[in-house]
Image (cartoon, rainbow, N blue to C red):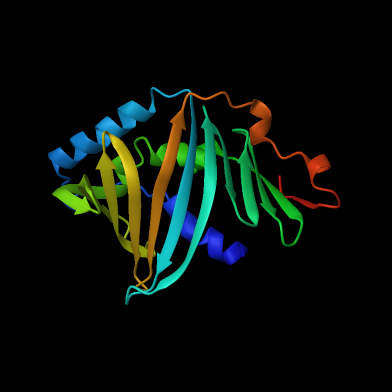
């Protein structure tokens, strides 16, 4: 369970930050306009609650599984909940809870390490880590989206391409193409901005998980 979720969490968290390097090509100004508009809209929200689905396919397009979950965001705080696992962060600490093992691992969030949080995926993560271009309108089902293609500057990353599908200045879905051939599609199925979300949502409360084993790495 843990392996299944944490690897696809590339979609949400582990676009691992790299240092931009000169001379590797230029990004498309039109692509930047689309991404900047997404970032600007997201920054107007005080809180965000989003339901999502995560689909995994192999290189032949065979469906290897689907997960659904919810992400909560408030300022620098976030919480990700899916079947079997939850990740909490109050902006200082990160709690990763594995339901099957009834175990929570606590680590310190180090801002100086440029850790990528869910919030950054909706803001300006693309500026230093990727080259990007606007591919144009793409029809998926009954809707038409702007497709933005991202290519990682660091070629040692496990993925070689990311496609963002944008509608009304919001990312509707993200598709990651791994070098192994696997593809991960993260889709937002519902998004509620500015709802009331208590600060306690972002802190792991051991009293609510009887018998939980705590591994404190701070």
Name the residue at 43% across, 61% down.
Answer: 55
Position of residue 169 in the picture relative to residue 92 (left or right): left
Residue lying at the far right in this picture: please name it.
211
The reply to whether residue 104 is in sight is: yes
In which quarter of the view is residue 198 placed? top right
Q: Picture coordinates of residue 23 (x, y %)?
A: 18, 51
Position of residue 58 in the picture relative to residue 66 (left or right): left
Question: Is residue 151 depicted above or below 76 in this figure?
Answer: below
Q: Picture coordinates of residue 125 (x, y %)?
A: 36, 41
Q: Picture coordinates of residue 176 (x, y %)?
A: 35, 59
Quarter that holds the N terminus: bottom right
Name the residue at 83% across, 40% down.
Answer: 207
Q: Nearer the viewer, residue 78 or 218?
A: 78
Question: Is residue 97 depicted above or below 112 in this figure?
Answer: below
Name the residue at 40% across, 53% down.
Answer: 186
Q: Picture coordinates of residue 142 (x, y %)?
A: 23, 49
Quarter that holds the C terminus: top right
Q: Nearer the viewer, residue 60 or 105?
A: 60
Question: Is residue 147 depicted above or below 55 in this figure?
Answer: above
Name the residue at 38% across, 38% down.
Answer: 122
Q: Nearer the viewer, residue 215 or 171?
A: 171
Residue lying at the far bottom in this picture: please name it.
60
């Amino acid at each position: 369970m843990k392996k299944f979720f944490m690897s696809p969490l590339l979609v949400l968290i582990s676009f691992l930050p790299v240092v931009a390097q000169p001379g590797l090509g230029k990004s498309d100004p039109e692509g930047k306009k689309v991404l900047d508009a997404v970032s600007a809209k997201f920054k107007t929200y005080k809180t965000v609650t989003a339901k999502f689905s995560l689909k995994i396919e192999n290189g032949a397009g065979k469906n290897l599984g689907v997960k659904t979950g919810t992400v909560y965001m408030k300022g620098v705080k976030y919480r990700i909940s899916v079947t079997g696992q939850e990740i909490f962060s109050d902006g200082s600490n990160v709690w990763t809870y594995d339901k099957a093992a009834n175990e929570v691992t606590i680590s310190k969030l180090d801002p100086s390490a440029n850790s990528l949080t869910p919030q950054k995926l909706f803001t300006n993560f693309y500026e230093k880590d990727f080259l990007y271009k606007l591919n144009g309108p793409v029809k998926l089902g009954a809707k038409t989206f702007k497709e933005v293609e991202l290519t990682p500057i660091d070629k040692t990353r496990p993925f070689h391409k990311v496609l963002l599908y944008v509608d009304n200045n919001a990312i509707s879905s993200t598709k990651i193409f791994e070098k192994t051939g696997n593809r991960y599609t993260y889709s937002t199925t519902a998004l509620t901005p500015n709802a009331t979300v208590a600060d306690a949502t972002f802190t792991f409360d051991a009293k609510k998980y009887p018998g939980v084993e705590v591994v404190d790495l701070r």
